Image (cartoon, coloured by chain):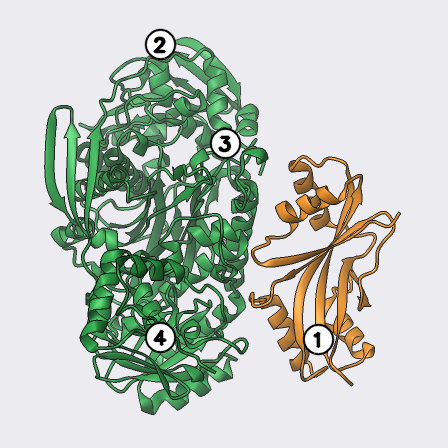
Chain colours: A green, B orange
Amino acid sequence: MNYVREIDILNADEKELIEISEKNLLSLDIEEMKKIKEYFLSIGRNPTDCELECIAQTWSEHCYHKTFKANIQYIEKNGKKIEKFNICLLREIMEVTEKLNYPWCISVFKDNAGIIKINEKYGAAFKVETHNHPSALEPYGGAGTGIGGVIRDILGVGLGAKPILNTDIFCFGPLDFPYEKLPEGVLHPKRIFRGVVSGVRDYGNRMGIPTANGAIIFDDRYVYNCLVYCGCVGIIPVNKIEKKVNDGDLIVVIGGRTGRDGIHGATFSSASLKENIPTSVVQIGNPIVEKKFQDVLLVARDLNLYNSITDCGAGGFSSAIGEMGKDIGAVVYLEKVPLKYEGLLPWEIFLSESQERMVLAVPEKKVEKLINFFASEDVEATVIGKFVKTGKLTVYYKNKLVCDIDIHFLHKGIPKKNLRGFFERKREKPVNFKSKNIKEDILKVLSSPIISSKEEVIRQYDHEVGGRTILKPFVGYESRGVSDGVVLKPFYETYEGLIISCGINPFYGEIDPYYMAGCCIEECIRNIVSCGGNPEKIAILDNFCWGNISDERELGNLIRCVKGCKDYALKYRIPFISGKDSLNNYFKRKDGKIISIPGTLLISGIGIIEDVRKICSTDFKKEGNIIFVLGKTFNELGSSQFYRVNRIKGGIVPKPRPEKTLSLMKKIHIGIKNQLIKSCHDCSDGGLITTICEMMIGGNLGCKIDFSNVLTEEKEIEIVLFSESCGRFVVEIEKEKLNEFEKLFKNEELSQIGEVIEEKELIGFWANKKLFKIPLELIYRSWTSLNF
Amino acid sequence: MSKEFWIIEIHKKKNIKDVFGQDTKKSIEEIGISEIDEVKVSNLYKIEAKTDKKNIERIAKELFIDNVSDNFSIYKKTRTKKGFWIVEIFLKEGVTDPVGETARKTIIESKILNDVVVKTGKKYYIKGKINQKQIKEICEKILANTLIHNYFILKKRT
């Protein structure tokens, strides 16, 4: 049988080159195909199918991040002013971390995840991935393997970290989207939603890792491309961060067997979704296999049985071995790879994205011990090749050479893309929209899909397993209030803690992606600070999901967003430690119309605190306590939930004020540490009123508020209640501590607005005149009204 | 003995609430097919091995059922049921079946058989005033993802 096909590119002209790329699902453009042809011309032969596939995977958007590394000519128009400059997106992000140069950022942007130092002995690793395309096609399997993949990223960072927490953030189409509007081949949002939630639940729960932080966003434009972000936090000893493959190390694959699953995942995920999809791109997860090797792997790490490790994700062995051996070279014997079933072609074995596999570099004299050790825990470990100093990636199948490419060409040969991006700033104008019935609007905002309680979803996840979760997703009375973030106590012997949270709001990006970036970064930090975090000990991760970036305007939006990330991260003095982008999330309808997702930025944050006993939750604690708003409210209702439920377009998007907010946050940290602040909740989606209602629900207490006392630029009820201005917190203070509190917050923007009361109702005043009275019961019912 | 296959069907006992069935019924109603009286769901294990029915019974009894809530039946060919449409769903060839794989290992480890292949599936009994077109719609929109599943419809016996 002829296992290897030679592909004639030496004699192909430009048109034929593109045909080859399309026919084999390579997702390579003409410049790249020409470069490949040039290489093979120089060595005087045609590539094999395996070589071509291997190059396509390595050069795919998913693995190489072509757009983020590209040289982009960017034009920004602001009224009559035109700015023009060249930009490299990845550099922009990395510059933040380099400039801040914190000693506690110990491994950034080079490994599978970013690592920050917790204490002298341990570091925390954090990584967030997306698994959008697979989840759109097979929600259960797609989401499960998304979680499985990011857990393996954590297992494969340094010499292996122990996963202790999963996060999940989803963007779906509206759950009540009409069936008749759904194009063929697209699953209904409700079905995707249920599948994704149960996929994350089953994988995380079965791995024994708590899933305790996340968010869910709904919008029409996510119907065709849902977004599924999966994150994982791990703990790693600081002396296990360095890894190095040595010449002569054996290549050992551990975990699951290889089948035809997920072939072309990397190249496929770099393309848009069309209406015909091959079965093979679907991946199915098996958490039991991953759980078994996780446990044994960490013991093998401490016994120093291997020199390096990485996970087999997109691109399969081709990617994992190619990446590990990129400074040396490797020889692989594909017939040694354990298969699920017979009949796979060599290139399929090399490229398969079967789940639950990892690749180790093992010194020859330790390999027997390692294999026996894994076998004792029922985990398959197989030698499939060797890292050898040849400078080449050489692959054999049954003595036949199927791949022999220069490593340098594979990793460095990709032509740099030259792209153009364009952004035109819109003039933001305030909208004059008056609420007809304030009480009704409050309830409408509370019951909107984005604000309302996601308890039904979150309760399906185990957020306790491992016993490290100190501040949980739910707090207060009957555990029904929401938390701003989650606090973990990773070690048995000390009180040190980690706080994890996120910030996401794609709607601000419709007006200006620059401020969206600022707002997302600030929301994430605010969440961490209101749990008790130290604003000077937070690191963040960026995850960009964008639409059709071959459109100059879409790319311009992305650049504008990256610029925002850089500027605001520098102003808040918060470093990026890792990131990922998923581009081309668009759908081409039969009529040729392209539907892109709204440019979506997820900022995930991890903060370190010295003592988990000095934290704060969001629920009101006791009647008689005084309620304050920290920060100032502006007329910033653009893309707010209030406008969304009333279908109002335009308006002014919130603008972060880093200096003010940073100084405020430092004081909040002190206030919480000294237990001056009884409860603290940040103001974001849904405005001040939503924040107050959520604190009431958590505390099962009412409150009396005079909204005219809120420090604001324009004294209008709609602005005070619903504006989503940044830099604001609601805090609860005991009467006796009032002086101490006011002393601490001297020179800050603060307004005393009311007090907590025993009667279970929200009584709103405006300049001593009663405006409305809403029973807590009704607030709670509206907030929990979303039917999943 | 030649290699043959049996299907083990695991269903809830009469007095136990069939939550999956009720959930499926709700999902069907949500796509606008409202005249559904009842939906019942069973788990299927397709066992391919050289063995006899007695061993298959042992597998079902000792490994697959929960004695408190489940009953099982064994068959080779799906039979119709009066008043019900029947839909059987299995994974397509080549799609990874983690539950089937775990079941296979368990059968071998418990020394009932030493060579076996297990494939898992689901079986739906649907009662209501629906036609062939509607049952197809239910299969494709709710029960199966045609990217990875094959489904078989067995007509209602009247």
Query: Mark 4 highlights which residue?
Result: A6
* Apparent side of residue A260 relative to residue B36 in the rendered image (left or right): left
Q: CA distance from mark 4 to mark 3?
A: 66 Å
At which x and y percent is residue A55? 30, 67
Q: Chain of mark 2?
A: A
Query: Mark 3 highlights which residue?
Result: A697
Q: Amino acid at mark 4?
A: Glu
Q: Chain of mark 3?
A: A
Q: Earlier in the sequence, mark 4 or mark 3?
A: 4
Q: Amino acid at mark 1?
A: Glu
Near-viewer residue (A679 or A246): A246
Q: Which mark is residue A367?
A: none
At which x and y percent is residue A15? 29, 57
Instruction: Please tell me whether residue A72 is drawn above or below residue A578 in the rendered image.
Output: above
Q: Chain of mark 4?
A: A
Query: Mark 1 highlights which residue?
Result: B48
Q: CA distance from mark 2 to mark 1?
A: 78 Å
Q: Amino acid at mark 2?
A: Ala
At which x and y percent is residue B152? 71, 56
Q: Amino acid at mark 3?
A: Ile
Which one is in front in this view, the residue at disc 2 or the one at disc 1? 1
Q: Residues within 10 Å of mark 1 (few under 14, many from 20)?
A: some
Q: CA distance from mark 1 to mark 3?
A: 56 Å
Query: Mark 2 highlights which residue?
Result: A767
Which one is in front in this view, the residue at disc 1 or the one at disc 4? 4
Q: Quadrant of residue A535?
A: top left
- What residue sits 80% from the left and 45% below the top? B127
